[in-house]
Amino acid sequence: MVALLPLLALAAGRPAAARSLPALFNTSETHANNLRPFPKWTGMLERYFEDTGRKPGVCTSRFFNRCHAKRWRDLVDRLKGRDLSSQLTAVNAFMNKARYTVDSINWGVRDYWATPGQFLAKYGDCEDYAIAKFLTLKRLGVDANSMRIVVLQDLNLRIPHAVLAIYTGGGITILDNQIKRLVQATAIRHYQPIFSLNEEGWWLHRRKRR
């Protein structure tokens, strides 16, 4: 991941200074619209729009089918019309029940970004939880531009990690598969973001100079 930083810095645009949004984990951000440096993200989105879950099957199948699609649809239907806090809490809890499964076991590769359908069928790792939450909340009508998948370094465990960040009027709420409850970004000290992204673009994060 660290080896990517020089390339990402070159691909990024100008620093996002004139923004009303709070800084994520107290970092400075450089924004870019070009998502070509992130083929795993764009490839996942392409598969997501093609993956309808219309094939018959049972929920124990490891291939996305009508049963998985119904579970997902029932969750969305149940949460429609509720306040944002209730939706975030319920989606976070629902997805966090999934069993953590590394990509090498699921897909035979080191890093694979799964669609929500693939996640519901085969589970996944940290970015897969965040993606499933992102696209579920989008189905519920949450503005996709207010959400970001955040790839970061966990300074306590010394490993890469990914979470979903939601920008609200009250700050930045973090949905994390390692934390059962919702938590404000300002309460987390051990996460160092590397980059964040959504469907409209991405942001390179750097520590602010003291």
Image (cartoon, rainbow, N blue to C red):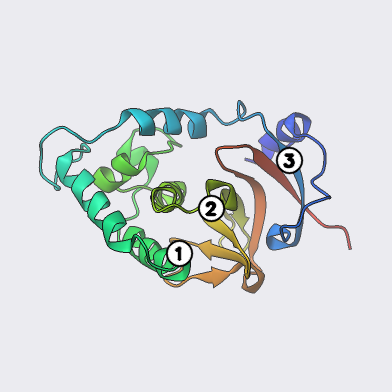
The quadrant of the image that shows the C terminus is bottom right
The residue lying toward the viewer, choosing from 177 and 70, is: 70
First in sequence: mark 3 vs mark 2: 3
Residue lying furthest front in this view? Answer: 81
The quadrant of the image that shows the N terminus is top right
Classed neighbour count for the residue bearing mark 2: other residues with Cα under 10 Å, few (<14), some (14–19), many (≥20): many
- Quarter of the image holding residue 76? bottom left
Residue lying furthest right in this view? Answer: 210
Classed neighbour count for the residue bearing mark 3: other residues with Cα under 10 Å, few (<14), some (14–19), many (≥20): many
Q: Which kind of residue does numbered mark 2 sit on?
A: His
**On screen, 105 above or below 178?**
above
Residue 161: numbered disc = 2
The residue lying toward the viewer, choosing from 185 and 4, is: 185
Labels 2 & 1 near each other (Cβ < 8 A): yes
Q: Secondary structure at mark 3?
A: strand
Residue 18: numbered disc = none
Q: Position of residue 137 (x, y in %)?
A: 43, 53
Residue at image point 82% right, 43% down: 15
**From the viewer's perspective, is 129 left or right of 3?**
left
Q: Position of residue 87 (x, y in %)?
A: 40, 64
- Residue to which mark 1 is pinned: 178
First in sequence: mark 1 vs mark 3: 3
**From the viewer's perspective, is 47 left or right of 1?**
left
Residue at image point 66% right, 29% down: 34
Q: Give the Cα separation between the discs numbered 2 and 1.
A: 10 Å
**On screen, 126 above or below 88?**
above
Q: Which kind of residue does numbered mark 1 sit on?
A: Gln
Residue 31: numbered disc = 3
**On screen, 112 above or below 151?**
above
